[in-house]
Image (spheres, grey):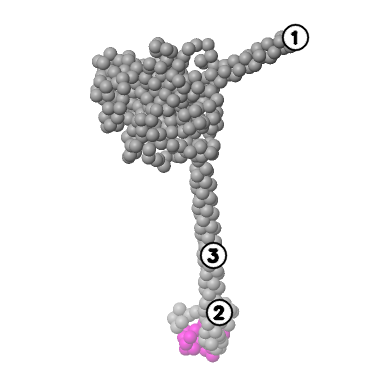
């Protein structure tokens, strides 16, 4: 009875450990696969996910609008942790979704290229790391990092200086007997600088979406890949991949696989066998968690404050203009009233002066007749009467046309 209980207990423990293994790495539970390498279709941008039995690696994460697509893809793989997160260089079409990867999954170590960038997209990525207490590091040149007993990665061009594509980290994955080279956007100058360190590889991730800036004949002669994967967008405005590059690849009998034509491209490294399959482009619906650089919010607040101050200043100026206009109108009205009063006073004064003048002027009126005269001898008046002009006018007398 006791032995039966022990046996039952051991079965439960083994079952639990097996279920835990299935939950952690379900893709490797029932097959002797060393690694799976996913070239995720994110359009004219780069995103590569590597699964080994013990570690997960994400190299770049597309553009800003690819965040949800990448999160959905990794969720479908039941990914919980990204052990190594690699940003090949700060261009937005490579680091745009990295902040979402950091915010949605546990992160072990983040590797970045040498140099820096002040772009908002790159700042969002760096702050998302800071928000989780993580500090990115530049990997050591040609230093091999073991993922498990079958897989390792190495980095090249880690000491690059300058800006843009020249900073691109180049990553070499060794998976059993198979090798994969991921070049970011490395131009021919970078290819030449690391050429002596590179082995022959099975799969080349073509640089810069197939642009003519990379994938030199010298590189192909040295690494002799069997497959070339080009991550590019359908009908993209840059016309990637360049015809010179595809012609060079075809001439070397290298099989070209393009995400714009194949969707997601997934290689499986298994013992001595290397195979691949293609799946449909992942949905971009949903809303990925992201952590933005707080300086962006501060800038928004500062801009809102500045706009509010400008609006307050505008309103104050408008109010001052309105007050000045009202004051000017009031002053004009008061001046008009003053002028009217002055004119009225002047008219009254004129009339008073005229009245006084009329009162002080005497004329002559006859005993009979309707005219007043200034000359008592006019019209043979006899014994005329002298009266004030105003009185004569008030009595209806009219001026004499001869003497007045």
Which residue is pictured at 50% across the width and 11% down the height?
31
Point out the tag, 3 or 2, that comes first from the N-terminus. 3
Q: For the residue labelled by badge 1, is the local secondary structure a helix, a strand or a loop?
A: loop
The percent position of residue 225, horizontal first and vertical second, equals 31, 18
Q: For the residue labelled by badge 2, is the local secondary structure a helix, a strand or a loop?
A: helix
Q: Which residue is mark 1?
A: 1
Point out the tag, 3 or 1, that comes first from the N-terminus. 1
How far, Cα to Cα, is label 2 from label 1?
Answer: 153 Å
**Image: magenta residue range:** 364-384
Q: Is residue 181 magenta?
A: no
Cβ atoms at labels 3 and 2 below 8 Å apart: no
Q: Which residue is mark 3?
A: 327
**How would you rate the neighbour count of disc 2 (Cα within 10 Å): few for under 14, some for 14-19, many for 20 or more?**
some
Main SS category, magenta section: loop
Farthest-out residue, bottom: 383
Front-most of residues 103 and 337: 103
Q: For the residue labelled by badge 3, is the local secondary structure a helix, a strand or a loop?
A: helix
Q: Is residue 235 visible?
A: no
Q: Which residue is mark 2?
A: 393
């Amino acid at each position: 009875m006791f032995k039966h209980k022990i046996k039952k207990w051991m079965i439960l423990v083994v079952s639990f450990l097996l279920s835990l293994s299935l939950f952690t790495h379900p893709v490797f539970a029932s097959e002797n696969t060393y690694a799976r390498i996913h070239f995720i279709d994110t359009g004219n941008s780069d995103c590569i996910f590597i699964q080994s039995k013990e570690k997960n690696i994400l190299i770049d994460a597309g553009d800003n609008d690819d965040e949800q697509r990448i999160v959905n893809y990794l969720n479908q793989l039941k990914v919980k942790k990204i052990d190594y997160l690699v940003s090949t260089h700060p261009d937005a079409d490579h680091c745009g979704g990295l902040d979402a990867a950091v915010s949605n999954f546990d992160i072990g170590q983040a590797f970045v290229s040498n140099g820096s960038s002040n772009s908002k997209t790159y700042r969002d990525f760096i702050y998302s790391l800071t928000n989780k207490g993580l500090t990115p590091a530049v990997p050591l040149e040609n230093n091999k990092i073991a993922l498990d007993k079958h897989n390792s990665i190495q980095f090249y061009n880690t000491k690059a200086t300058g800006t843009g594509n020249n900073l691109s980290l180049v990553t070499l994955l060794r998976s059993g007997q198979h090798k994969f080279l991921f070049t970011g956007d490395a131009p021919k100058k970078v290819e030449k600088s690391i050429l002596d360190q590179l082995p022959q590889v099975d799969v080349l991730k073509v640089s810069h979406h197939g642009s003519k800036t990379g994938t030199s004949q010298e590189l192909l002669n040295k690494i002799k890949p069997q497959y070339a994967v080009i991550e590019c967008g359908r009908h993209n405005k840059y016309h990637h991949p360049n015809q010179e590059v595809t012609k060079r690849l075809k001439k070397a009998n290298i099989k070209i696989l393009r995400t714009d034509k194949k969707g997601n491209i997934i290689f499986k490294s298994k013992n001595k066998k290397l195979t691949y399959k293609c799946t449909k482009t992942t949905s971009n619906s949903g809303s990925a968690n992201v952590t933005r650089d707080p300086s962006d919010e501060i800038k928004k607040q500062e801009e809102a404050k500045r706009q509010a101050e400008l609006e307050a200043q505008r309103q104050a100026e408008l109010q001052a203009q309105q007050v000045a206009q009202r004051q000017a109108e009031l002053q004009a009205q008061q001046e008009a009233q003053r002028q009217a009063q002055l004119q009225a006073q002047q008219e009254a004064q004129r009339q008073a002066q005229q009245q006084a003048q009329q009162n002080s002027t005497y004329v002559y009126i006859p005993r009979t007749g309707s005219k007043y005269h200034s000359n008592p001898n006019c019209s043979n008046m006899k014994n005329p009467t002298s009266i004030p002009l105003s009185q004569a006018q008030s009595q209806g007398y009219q001026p004499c046309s001869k003497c007045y």
